[in-house]
């Protein structure tokens, strides 16, 4: 018996049931977006928040669907992990050209979710249902039909703003007149789908998820013409004090976490591919707290480098070294290790070795870096970038001083940048 919708299984039977009044909700037709005009949207979860023991409706039996008992909510608050809700949500959005990401068939980490810019979750604050088992007299409690009402508080979270930016209260009703296995679920999912349509009709939600003329990036591809980077001497951090170098280092937010990056021109930033992931747009934060959006222009997973462009005129940038650093020479790493609040952390060390790893050259150094430093610069004593932080070897919480960096000259060649 298909009973994935847990809220319709969690009931207490107590005498003759009292039917719930199912509101008739009229939902306006949804106007479809133009194709490719939606930011990627991910449905995160649905949470039911009802009082323990709250009456939600009746279960009924027989051909005439006579009330037999009450449906009372047994859980105070329950997160329902059900692919059916995700699929119903995606079906409604895709129907009207809203782009969705998230694969319900993925058994491990779903790489498509990196692309999501808007997350949507729902809080069910009211639920009513009358469920009928017409063949219960024959002992058949598998086939059911019914009607349901649902009230949802939708919360819309912007990954670029890193906060909830809008809430929408929506209602929906649903009905299933044909007795079948899981018929009670269908009625509730129909009500849920109507509440989704109400969300799609909300004008502020449509503004939040609309691309509004944004250009599609070349994310995850190395294509197009060479990019010429012009050095602005008045903005260059070369031959400046170490304390000023943090002005050219940024914190990048994409996917589920953060990494680092560094500025190489008026509007270009380099980081790791694994920091930007498969995102088209990322949130960027300067060391002075100013935040803005950047677009991933080019990205290469094998070398683990990515190039980001922004419309903001950036105040400082690094010059890029053309040669590998000498073993034993001093280097400095800057980034945001572990936590966002630790941005602009500076650590010094030496170049320990130059390694060949799977057809790649890597700079090895004992400079102290941790997760969150990824994508940040490795800088020589002249204030020029010689490498990009990519990985390290650690034992538990202890850094072993075995850290690796991508030579900057290899990175700019892969990204088709001409200095």
Image (cartoon, helix red, strand yellow):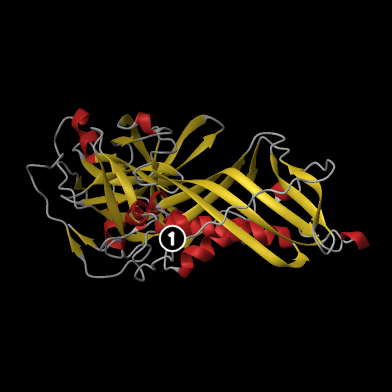
Instruction: Describe residue 258's horizontal placement relative to residue 318 as left or right.
Output: right
Q: Residue at x 38, y 60 (%)?
A: 300
Q: Nearer the viewer, residue 65 or 186?
A: 65
The quadrant of the picture occupied by the N terminus is bottom right
Instruction: Describe residue 12's horizontal placement relative to residue 418 as left or right.
Output: right
Q: Is residue 346 above or below residue 221?
A: above
Query: Quick check: can you spot residue 112?
Result: no
Quadrant of residue 142 within the rendered picture = bottom right
Q: Nearer the viewer, residue 383 or 259?
A: 259
**Residue 313 placed where, x, y %?**
15, 47
Which secondary structure, mark 1?
loop
**Residue 180 placed where, x, y %?**
77, 67
The quadrant of the picture occupied by the C terminus is bottom left
Label count reads: 1
Instruction: Describe residue 241's horizontal placement relative to residue 69 as left or right.
Output: left
**Residue 254 placed where, x, y %?**
39, 48
Query: Which residue, given by chain and number where applicable, does mark 1 sit on?
Result: 359
The 10 Å Cα crowd at callout 1, few under 14, some 14 to 19, many 20 or more, is few
Query: Quick check: can you spot residue 270?
Result: yes
Q: Residue at x 91, y 60 (%)?
A: 137
Q: Residue at x 19, y 44 (%)?
A: 318
């Amino acid at each position: 018996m298909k009973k994935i919708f847990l809220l319709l299984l969690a009931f207490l039977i107590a005498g003759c049931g009292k039917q719930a009044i199912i509101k008739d909700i009229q939902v306006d037709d949804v106007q479809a977006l133009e194709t490719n005009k939606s930011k990627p949207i991910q449905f995160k979860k649905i949470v039911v928040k009802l009082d323990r023991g709250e009456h939600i409706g009746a279960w009924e039996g027989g051909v005439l669907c006579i009330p037999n008992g009450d449906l009372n909510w047994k859980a105070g608050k329950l997160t329902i992990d059900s692919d059916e809700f995700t699929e119903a949500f995606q079906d409604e959005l895709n129907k009207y050209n809203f782009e969705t990401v998230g694969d319900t068939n993925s058994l491990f980490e779903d790489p498509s979710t990196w692309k999501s810019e808007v997350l949507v979750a729902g809080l069910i604050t009211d639920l009513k249902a009358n469920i009928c088992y017409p063949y219960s007299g024959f002992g058949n409690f598998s086939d059911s039909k019914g009607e349901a009402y649902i009230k949802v508080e939708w919360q819309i979270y912007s990954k670029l703003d890193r906060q909830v930016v809008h809430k929408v209260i929506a209602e929906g009703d649903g009905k299933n007149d044909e007795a079948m296995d899981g018929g009670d679920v269908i009625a509730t999912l129909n009500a849920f789908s109507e509440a989704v349509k109400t969300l799609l009709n909300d004008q502020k939600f449509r503004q939040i998820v609309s691309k509004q003329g944004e250009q599609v990036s070349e994310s995850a591809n190395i294509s197009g013409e060479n990019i010429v980077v012009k050095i602005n001497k008045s903005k260059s951090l070369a031959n400046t004090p170490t304390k000023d170098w943090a002005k050219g280092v940024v914190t990048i937010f994409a996917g589920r976490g953060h990494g680092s990056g560094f500025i190489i021109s008026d509007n270009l930033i380099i980081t790791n591919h694994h920091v930007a992931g498969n995102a088209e747009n990322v949130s960027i934060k300067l060391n002075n707290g100013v935040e803005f959006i950047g677009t991933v222009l080019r990205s290469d997973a094998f070398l683990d480098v990515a190039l980001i462009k922004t419309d903001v005129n950036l105040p400082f940038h690094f010059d890029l070294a053309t040669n590998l650093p000498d073993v034993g020479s001093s280097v400095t790493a800057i980034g945001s290790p572990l936590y966002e609040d630790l941005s602009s952390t500076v650590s010094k060390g030496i170049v320990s070795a130059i390694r060949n790893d799977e057809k790649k050259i890597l700079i090895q150094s004992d400079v102290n870096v941790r997760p969150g430093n990824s994508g940040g610069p490795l800088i020589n004593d002249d204030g020029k970038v010689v490498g990009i932080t990519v990985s390290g070897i650690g034992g538990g919480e202890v850094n072993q001083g075995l850290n690796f960096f991508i030579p900057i000259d290899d990175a700019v060649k892969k990204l088709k940048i001409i200095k």
